[in-house]
Image (cartoon, rainbow, N blue to C red):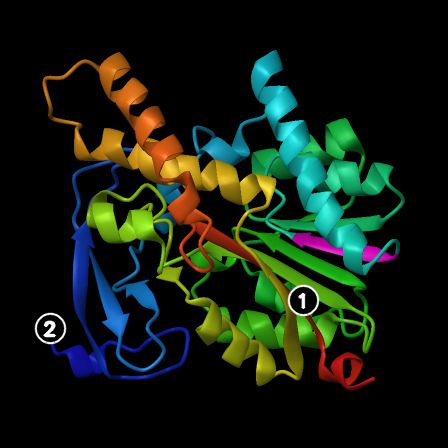
Amino acid sequence: MNNSLIICRTCGSKYNKQFIYANDLNQKKNDEVFMYYLCDNCKSIFLDPVPSNLKSYYGQEYPAYARKNTKKNKNNYTNLEYAKLDIVKKYSLSGTLVEVGPAAGHFISLASLNGYKVLGLEQDAECVSHIKDIYKLDVICSDKPTEQLFKMRSYCDVIVAWHVIEHLQDLMGFIAAASMALRKPSGVIIVSAPNPNALSFKVFGRYWVHLDAPRHLTLIPIQALDKLMAEQGLERVECIYDDLVGLQLNRMGWQSSLMNLSRNNTLRWPLLAGFGKILAISMSLLDRIQGKGAAYTAVYKGKSIMAE
């Protein structure tokens, strides 16, 4: 394939090169091989072409869509959602909060209980039904969040997208729409995403659990995301690598990636899991070095706020 026809969905550059190939190691839907490219301009890593049957790689077995959990998992979810809420409260104590990709509704329900007026934009119909039936919250079933946000001009005080932007095909349009939907100048956009500069990614490559081919279409460096936001009049006010969610993803970056690497190994899984846990603990200090964790959470506000 002519690489000049491969266009980076983060910056639009045509200067890209083949970077890494990967299979669906996390969900094991099939044995198809996917190609990721590296943008010479913004350093984003992106999948091309996007599978025409992309929706088939999700489904109710997709971890984020899980609605039934053990008591241990439920407690873990609760702790993680409170950690997210702490970030939101730091910048906005009330108002209209729109969550893009609420999945099973764990966070959006907590935000509602804490006084926010909430609305979800979710592509999975069963999750939408769950949120409406169980939590009695407003949620729009749509796989086109950009179109929905364009309809919400100056509607949102807070927009959150917890590990969503890596799934989007229209990344530039999405950020433009989110900016338009934000109430200026007090509104905030909070996004989290896998970090392509993560140390664990450099070690494991195509076996990295957070590559998650083909569901993750783009791994976006924080500097590239900053530039996209700046084009919409937004400036980053914080970037977090070691929040509770980030620390869990760091552990997964080592432990689960090791399991991916050893799928065909004759070693027993309990041994691998134990070694992976030790590896994650031993690498935790390096992960905490700025910019080396498996994921980041970034907060953006209007530039006028920064000037005051």
Image spot of residue 54 (x, y percent): 35, 50
Residue 97 highlighted magenta (yes or no): yes
Quarter-of-image position of residue 69: top right
Would you say the magenta stretch is mainly helix, strand or loop?
A: strand
Q: Is residue 145 above or below residue 99?
A: below
| Residues packed near mark 2 inside 10 Å, few (<14), some (14 to 19) or many (20 plus) | few
Dot 2 lies on which element? loop
Q: Quadrant of the N terminus?
A: bottom left
Left or right of 259 on screen, residue 1: left
Between 180 and 256, the residue placed more toward the observer is: 256
Quarter-of-image position of residue 283: top left
| Residues packed near mark 1 inside 10 Å, few (<14), some (14 to 19) or many (20 plus) | many
Image spot of residue 280 (x, y percent): 36, 33
Q: CA distance from mark 2 to mark 1?
A: 35 Å
Type of residue at label 1? Leu
Dot 1 lies on which element? helix
Q: Is residue 124 visible?
A: no
Image spot of residue 85 (x, y percent): 74, 45
Image spot of residue 248 (x, y percent): 49, 36
Between 117 and 286, the residue placed more toward the observer is: 286
Identify residue for label 1. Answer: 149
Residue 249 highlighted magenta (yes or no): no
Q: Is residue 251 above or below residue 191?
A: above
Which residue sits at x=29%, y=51%? Answer: 201
Which residue sits at x=18%, y=35%? Answer: 261
Query: Which of marks 1 and 2 precedes in the sequence?
Result: 2
Between 293 and 127, the residue placed more toward the observer is: 293
- Magenta part of the protein: which range? 95-99
Q: Quadrant of the C terminus?
A: bottom right
Which residue sits at x=83%, y=58%? Answer: 92
Identify residue for label 2. Answer: 1
